């Protein structure tokens, strides 16, 4: 501390103050004779004590005189009037001693304890008037007196830097400075100090200024010297900053001037400024270590915290910035000084400062709150800035990271299991224990944040750790400010709403930038602090593993705001390698197989196991990455996005859906949207969620991260891909589907080439066994449809064309320009169409509608024709696809045709005011609810039915594909399905069915009948198809004839197609007659020749090894398309397992030949 503590002790006891860290005999001026104090003989401790006691006695005697004198001088008025802090002079008979200080100052501890025989007696709070001076502190500056000019320069310099004045002349005072009355005129006497203030005087002047009590009237300057009420740390920081600025200006002048004499003077002034900077650092460090050293510094750590909090918002008072360059600021210098003297004391000081900041942070609930005026005070941005500025010194950063409050207690320790109960609200007077328990219960219900929690938990993380307190602040959707800002949302314009959300968004992003800076500083401060930050990340991700639920338990997991800010911080840490493929290549997949590295986040065992793409067995391989931090950032970031943006998108979608349905309900009931409270509340929530979920900065960063992730996966070997967490690909798909629906415009300008290629690769047959999750595979298809299908008008997508097209291929769509897409996508989509049968009941409709649209686009693209030709090479995959088509049409179309009349009935009922008004409110609500469910069902099913029929039409224009549909495995099912639909459209007068707004349901019966008849005509010449139509239970001659007449009447088919359809009706009728004749032949067949399931004569009997039963191959094949078990005992079974019943088949053949011969003989007779 540059000798400060010994200096202050010597000064207080009469030994001379202000010895700088430089040579005390060198006052930086040639020819100076101001050396009297340095040449005095040393005095003994007994002599020093005697002089001290004499001064104390004189102070007691002069107490009343000093007060009266000070009051009189203060009353003289004017800017240059003497300050109320005038110091009495010592008795004339005594030796002149340095300025006396208050008793509290004299009792402050020094660097070393005073000798035991030196008694530090208390002194009254009195000041001693300096001896009269024959001249002012500056003297008379004339052209013939260069020393007077120099003295004046120094005085003015001290006014500007230290904001103090001294001397007896009225011109020595100014209202903007604190006037010091010194008990020795050595500093300002021209006779004693011809060159004025010297380097050795700096410490004494600062000591005199700092020794003033907070109540001193001398501190009442105009304007105030410190925003903290004359606080010590703020004042010293300002002196340091001003000294640096003056020094820089002087040095610039010295470089311009050539005169040696002038340079000597300026060197002398620079020496004083350097000493000021050294001494203010020393005094500040001492006051922080010993806060009661000066009364003004009793709360020095709190003062430092306040200075740090205002630094970023008020650069003029910044203590972390200095004009002289890096690592020269007041704060940095104080930290270095403290650490060099006592590292433990330094850590204690930093801990105290952090404690003050976090105590104020804990009182701030969100970024929308002003915070408390107590303690450091200020809002969340001020307090986060304070921590950020505290970390501008690397040693302070490490000290912060090493604080016990930086991390939660380790798992499975007593402190981790400690249950913390937030304080109860003020209870009514006389409340019983039972009443208090009820108050607590009601508080927990209304405000989960007030519920008890474990110290090691999500809530504990955000309330008990430094980073948690910082990252927990955000803009909660349920904050009162949201309600007031978005009041009456139904009456607002979209422009008005955008302005409000942009304002909140800017506020949030500014705060997040401070969080990013804070975490980055902690990370780069060194290995020790970086490891502590990593451990905090691990705790945050482990404790919030269930935060992605629809309704997460907030007594166990952290708030949405903390998790959001965590993801923003991790995205920022990933930024250096997001757009740098070379750095991204350093992401080592072995990280997820190294428990020591991921800390249990990517475990494959236990309740929190994360499924892998290809396997989910425990793995622990050797992990030796080239760079350990990059893979950590990547995988931690991907996990944090699972807990934030993915569930956030789902919650926003739910709110938007509720807004839509509430809007429709109110409209249907002729209600007023503007005044409806429920609708306005839902709209408020939607707008509040858009602050984050439609943030251009955040969402775009997420897009860029996932495209980078896709690029990393594309470069991995298959064995590495198997170990990758499945959630990364799943989240990627969820985010892209969300974006296409709600924020498609944000996709513009982002490169998604890696993402497209990853979707195509994972859907290909080669990787079908790697990505085994059917729901995930279906999502990959959704991404291709929602993001990369050009001109997708059916879904009303706003995805920009720049996203769907590849700039490296001249702007062609990725679907037609990518090599792998052209080779494998068409067969992959056909396979996927069948696989989505295993997804949810409602979800599979949407998936298949999108797959069908993709296939139509590919079919129309010449680039994909060769791939469609190869589809027929994989019979098993094609049968799976075709079976999916048949199943959907059978299930969905029948349901739709039954539901549409019900919808029409309710529409007519609602349109009749008398009939609708006659119903009770409960009846209307019941009918409306059922009506909305019916509408949703039809809106899901009809688009799929339409797309399937169109797909059958264009696929069967290819002979090879048509032949696949005619295989014995599929032809019966196809014929049944087509006739079933024809029955609903023509036989049940489906064409005459009317509903309001049919387009909203995609109900186009004539168009569907046209597509259906096109399919019939494409198979008209096939004998197999004719026979299967005749066998169908839906076939009647009237149905086919009526269909032909309807097509002709409406002009649905023309030319050859119409002729083929009419021919089919004739051919099927002929086949039906033959079939009836055959049935007469089979009715006498032995039971063993009949299929036990269908009771039909078998054509290819096979034995089921799992049960021993014999059935027709066609029957079991169709059964296994939908159910992979033996129909007789539910054991697993595949078509490859069945055994041909050769002997039975030969026996049936002989019987059939004999029966036919008998019939022929009977016919001849």
Image (cartoon, rainbow, N blue to C red):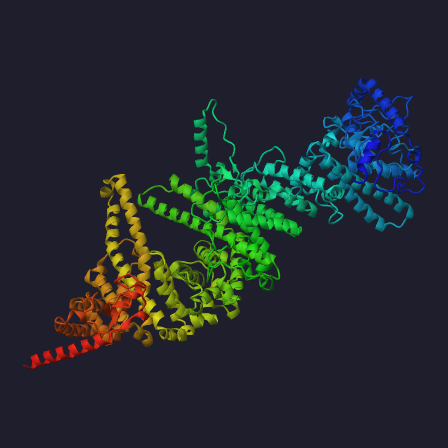
Residue lying at 39% horizontally and 70% vertically, measured from the top left = 827
Looking at the image, which is closer to me, 493 or 107? 107
Q: Percent position (x, y) of residue 151?
A: 87, 37
Residue lying at 67% horizontally and 51% vertically, measured from the top left = 526
Q: Percent position (x, y) of residue 963?
A: 30, 75
Q: Quadrant of residue 895?
A: bottom left
Q: What is the tally of numbered marks visible in this picture?
A: 0
Q: Percent position (x, y) of residue 320?
A: 70, 44
Looking at the image, which is closer to me, 795 or 634? 634
Identify whether 558 is placed above or below 82: below
Q: Percent position (x, y) of residue 914?
A: 23, 42
Lateral position of residue 900 relative to residue 172, left or right: left
Looking at the image, which is closer to me, 26 or 29? 26
Identify whether 1062 is placed above or below 271: below
Residue lying at 70% horizontally and 46% vertically, measured from the top left = 395
State which quarter of the image contains the N terminus: top right
Does any portion of residue 473 appear in the rendered image?
no
Lateral position of residue 626 relative to residue 201, left or right: left
Identify whether 161 is placed above or below 984: above
Does any portion of residue 1040 appear in the rendered image?
yes
Lateral position of residue 119 relative to residue 546, left or right: right
State which quarter of the image contains the C terminus: bottom left
Looking at the image, which is closer to me, 1093 or 681? 1093
Identify whether 1039 is placed above or below 305: below
Residue lying at 27% horizontally and 44% vertically, measured from the top left = 926
């Amino acid at each position: 501390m540059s000798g400060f503590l010994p200096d202050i002790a010597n000064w207080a006891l009469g030994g001379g103050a202000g010895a700088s860290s430089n040579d005390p005999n060198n006052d930086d001026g040639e020819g100076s004779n101001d050396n009297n104090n340095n040449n005095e003989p040393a005095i003994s401790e007994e002599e020093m004590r005697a002089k001290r006691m004499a001064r104390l006695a004189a102070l007691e005697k002069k107490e009343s005189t000093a007060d009266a004198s000070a009051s009189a001088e203060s009353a003289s008025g004017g800017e240059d009037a003497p300050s109320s802090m005038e110091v009495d002079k010592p008795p004339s008979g005594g030796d002149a001693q340095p300025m006396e200080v208050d008793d509290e100052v004299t009792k402050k501890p020094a660097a070393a304890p005073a000798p035991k025989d030196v008694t530090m007696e208390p002194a009254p709070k009195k000041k001693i008037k300096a001896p009269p001076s024959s001249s002012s502190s500056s003297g008379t500056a004339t052209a013939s007196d260069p020393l007077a000019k120099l003295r004046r320069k120094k005085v003015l310099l001290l006014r500007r830097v230290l904001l103090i004045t001294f001397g007896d002349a009225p011109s020595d005072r100014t209202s903007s400075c604190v006037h010091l009355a010194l008990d020795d005129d050595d500093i300002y006497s021209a006779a004693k100090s011809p060159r004025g203030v010297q380097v050795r005087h700096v410490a004494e002047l600062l000591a005199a200024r700092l020794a003033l009590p907070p109540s001193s009237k001398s501190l009442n300057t105009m304007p105030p010297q410190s925003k903290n009420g004359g606080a010590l740390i703020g004042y010293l920081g300002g002196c340091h900053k001003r000294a640096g600025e003056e020094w820089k200006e002087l040095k610039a002048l010295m470089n311009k001037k050539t005169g040696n004499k002038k340079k000597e003077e300026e060197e002398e002034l620079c020496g004083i400024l350097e000493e000021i900077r050294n001494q203010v650092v020393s005094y500040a460090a001492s006051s922080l270590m010993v806060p009661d050293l000066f009364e003004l510094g009793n709360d020095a750590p709190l003062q430092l915290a306040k200075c740090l909090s205002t630094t970023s918002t008020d650069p003029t008072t910044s203590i972390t910035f200095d004009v002289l360059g890096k690592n020269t600021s007041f704060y940095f210098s104080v930290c270095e000084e403290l650490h060099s003297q006592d590292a433990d004391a330094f850590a204690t000081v930093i801990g105290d400062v952090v404690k003050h900041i976090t105590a104020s942070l804990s009182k701030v609930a969100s970024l929308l709150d002003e915070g408390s005026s107590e303690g450091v005070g200020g809002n969340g941005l001020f307090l986060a800035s304070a921590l950020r500025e505290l970390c501008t010194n690397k040693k302070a950063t490490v000290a912060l990271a090493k604080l016990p409050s930086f991390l939660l207690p380790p798992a499975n320790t007593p402190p981790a299991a400690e249950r913390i109960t937030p304080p109860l609200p003020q209870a009514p007077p006389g409340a019983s224990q039972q009443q208090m328990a009820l108050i607590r219960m009601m508080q927990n219900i209304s405000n989960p944040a007030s519920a008890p929690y474990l110290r090691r938990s999500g809530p504990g993380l955000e309330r008990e750790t430094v980073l948690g307190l910082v990252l927990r602040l955000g803009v909660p959707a349920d904050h009162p400010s949201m309600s007031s800002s978005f009041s009456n949302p139904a009456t607002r314009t979209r422009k008005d709403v955008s302005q409000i959300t942009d304002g909140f968004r800017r506020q949030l992003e500014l705060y997040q930038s401070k969080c990013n800076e804070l975490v980055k500083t902690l990370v780069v401060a060194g290995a020790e602090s970086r490891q502590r930050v990593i451990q905090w990340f691990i705790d945050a991700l482990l404790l919030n593993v269930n935060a992605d639920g629809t309704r997460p338990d907030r007594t166990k997991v952290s708030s949405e705001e903390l998790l959001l800010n965590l993801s923003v911080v991790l995205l920022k840490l990933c930024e250096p390698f997001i757009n740098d493929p070379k750095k991204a290549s350093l992401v080592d997949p072995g990280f997820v197989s190294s428990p020591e590295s991921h800390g249990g986040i990517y475990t494959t065992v236990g309740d929190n196991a994360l499924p892998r793409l290809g396997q989910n067995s425990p793995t622990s391989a050797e992990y030796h990455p080239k760079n350990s931090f990059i893979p950590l950032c990547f995988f931690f970031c991907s996990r944090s996005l699972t807990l934030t943006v993915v569930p956030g998108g789902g919650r926003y979608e739910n709110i938007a859906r509720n807004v839509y349905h509430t809007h429709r309900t109110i409209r249907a009931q002729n209600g007023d949207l503007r005044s409806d409270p429920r609708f306005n509340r839902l709209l408020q929530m939607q707008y509040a969620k858009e602050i984050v979920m439609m943030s251009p900065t955040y969402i775009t960063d997420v897009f860029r991260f996932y495209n980078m992730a896709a690029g990393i996966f594309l470069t991995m070997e298959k064995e590495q891909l198997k170990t990758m967490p499945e959630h990364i690909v799943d989240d990627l798909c969820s985010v892209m589907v969300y974006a296409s629906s709600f924020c498609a415009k944000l996709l513009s300008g982002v490169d998604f080439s890696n993402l497209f290629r990853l979707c195509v690769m994972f859907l290909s047959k080669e990787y079908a066994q790697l990505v085994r999750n059917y729901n995930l595979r279906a999502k990959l298809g959704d991404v291709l449809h929602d993001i990369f299908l050009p001109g997708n008008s059916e879904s009303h997508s706003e995805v920009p064309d720049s996203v769907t097209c590849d700039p490296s291929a001249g702007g062609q769509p990725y679907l037609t320009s990518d090599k792998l897409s052209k080779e494998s996508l068409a067969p992959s989509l056909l396979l996927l169409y069948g696989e989505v049968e295993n997804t949810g009941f409602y979800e599979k409709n949407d998936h298949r509608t999108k797959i069908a649209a993709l296939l139509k686009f590919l079919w129309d693209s010449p680039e994909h024709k060769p791939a469609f030709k190869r589809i027929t090479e994989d019979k098993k995959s094609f049968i799976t696809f075709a079976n999916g088509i048949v199943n959907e049409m059978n299930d969905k179309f029948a349901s739709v045709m039954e539901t549409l009349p019900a919808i029409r009935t309710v529409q007519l009922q609602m349109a009749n005011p008398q009939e609708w008004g006659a119903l009770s409110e409960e009846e209307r609500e019941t009918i409306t609810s059922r009506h909305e469910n019916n509408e949703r069902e039809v809106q899901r099913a009809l688009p799929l039915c339409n797309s399937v029929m169109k797909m059958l039409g264009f696929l069967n224009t290819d002979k090879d594909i048509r032949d696949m549909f005619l295989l014995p495995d599929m032809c019966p099912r196809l014929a049944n399905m087509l006739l079933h639909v024809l029955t609903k459209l023509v036989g049940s007068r489906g064409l005459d069915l009317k509903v309001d707004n049919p387009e909203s349901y995609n109900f186009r019966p004539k168009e569907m009948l046209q597509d259906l008849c096109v399919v019939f005509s494409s198979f008209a010449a096939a004998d197999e198809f004719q026979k299967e139509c005749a066998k169908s239970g839906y076939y009647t001659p009237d149905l086919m004839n009526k269909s032909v007449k309807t097509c002709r009447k409406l002009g649905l088919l023309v030319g050859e197609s119409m002729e083929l359809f009419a021919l089919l009706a004739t051919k099927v009728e002929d086949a039906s007659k033959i079939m009836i004749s055959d049935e007469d032949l089979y009715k006498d067949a032995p039971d063993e020749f009949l299929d036990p399931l269908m009771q039909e004569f078998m054509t290819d009997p096979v034995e089921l090894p799992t049960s021993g039963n014999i059935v027709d191959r066609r029957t079991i094949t169709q059964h296994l398309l939908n159910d992979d078990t033996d129909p007789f005992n539910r054991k697993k079974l595949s078509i490859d397992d069945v055994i041909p019943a050769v002997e039975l088949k030969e026996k049936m053949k002989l019987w059939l030949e004999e029966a036919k011969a008998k019939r022929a003989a009977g016919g001849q007779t």
